[in-house]
Amino acid sequence: MLETYKLIEAAPTLASLAVMEVILSLDRLIEVNEAASHLPEPNRNAAQNVGSLLADLCRLAGLVVAVPLIAQFVWAQILGALYLLYIMSTHFAAKRIHGVHHRTRSWSRTRCILEIGLFDLALSVGSIVAALTLTRDVEIIWLSVIVWMIVLRLLKAPLLALVRRFPILTANAPILSGGIGVLLLIQIVLAGRGLPTPSQEIKLLGLLAIVALSAAYDLLPGLQTLLGRPLAIVGKPLMRLLHDSLSLVFFPLHAVLRGLVPK
């Protein structure tokens, strides 16, 4: 059990995990809701619940497998970091991870459940890797994951309403994923050279800075005018190049999972 003193000591870590889980979970909620929109209205909630339950079970199993694997092997950490960058690049390269939301206007219930489960699982894996970047304390990670799973189940409707009213809440998700991926790569390099890695306080400040800068860009037209064209000229081609390069790594797994979904 987590002692009170340990929770107090882990306050910066818990705050970092809270920032990450709030943004990534809200983004997941929106995407799952979008996938369910391919079903008739009466069937959507049931499909969301079953698909998300499948993803949650896989996520808990992933915690059991991924935590010791990533903590022990550098290659697994590098693969996890690249996966977070892949999530970011799919957004900015205008390609979805699941890539099928707009191909058909309606899906069968089975297809919709599997689509929701697979997509929810894809982003859940990113959340696990991100959590392991912020801390290697297994109890803290489990606490964070389980708490947010419960919160999403209990508060799904009000959270969806909140995000629809303030879409900026999920605009940070791809950038945050990529930022944590870069942080993990930096930690790997520093650890490999025997140098100290960033403290929990520095990680928290870094996450808050990413969120603040992303929000400022979305909210300030002047900043968009200043940076919009350079980002379009340089940033988007770089994201496409990054996405195409990382697809060589993740496409085989993606293709296998896609083959499980009936057309």
Image: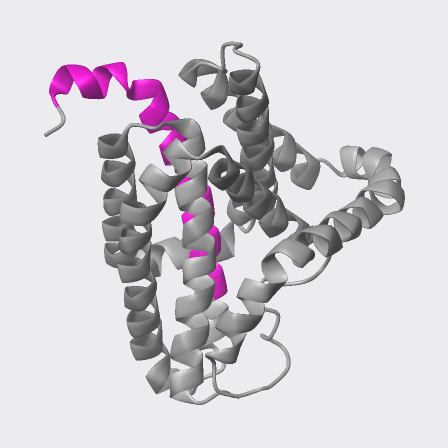
Does residue 53 appear to the left or right of 98 in the view shown? left
Q: Is residue 173 visible?
A: no
> Looking at the picture, how far across and down is residue 252, in whole percent?
59, 65
Residue located 88% across and 38% down the image: 230
Does residue 63 appear to the left or right of 23 in the view shown? left
> Looking at the picture, how far across and down is residue 238, in whole percent?
80, 45
Name the image quarter holding the N terminus. top left
On screen, 108 above or below 259? below
> Looking at the picture, how far across and down is residue 90, in whole percent?
65, 55
On screen, 43 above or below 236? below
Q: Nearer the viewer, residue 168 or 82?
A: 82
Residue 58 covered by magenta stretch: no
- Colour scheme: one colour
> Within the image, what quadrant is residue 13 found in?
top left
Residue located 58% across and 86% down the image: 105
Residue located 28% across and 19% down the image: 10
> Within the image, what quadrant is residue 9 found in?
top left
On screen, 56 above or below 87? below
Q: Nearer the viewer, residue 67 or 194?
A: 194
Report the span colored magenta. 3-31
Does residue 7 appear to the left or right of 40 in the view shown? left
> Looking at the picture, how far across and down is residue 247, in whole percent?
67, 57
Q: Nearer the viewer, residue 53 or 28?
A: 53
Residue 7 covered by magenta stretch: yes
Q: Is residue 250 visible?
A: yes
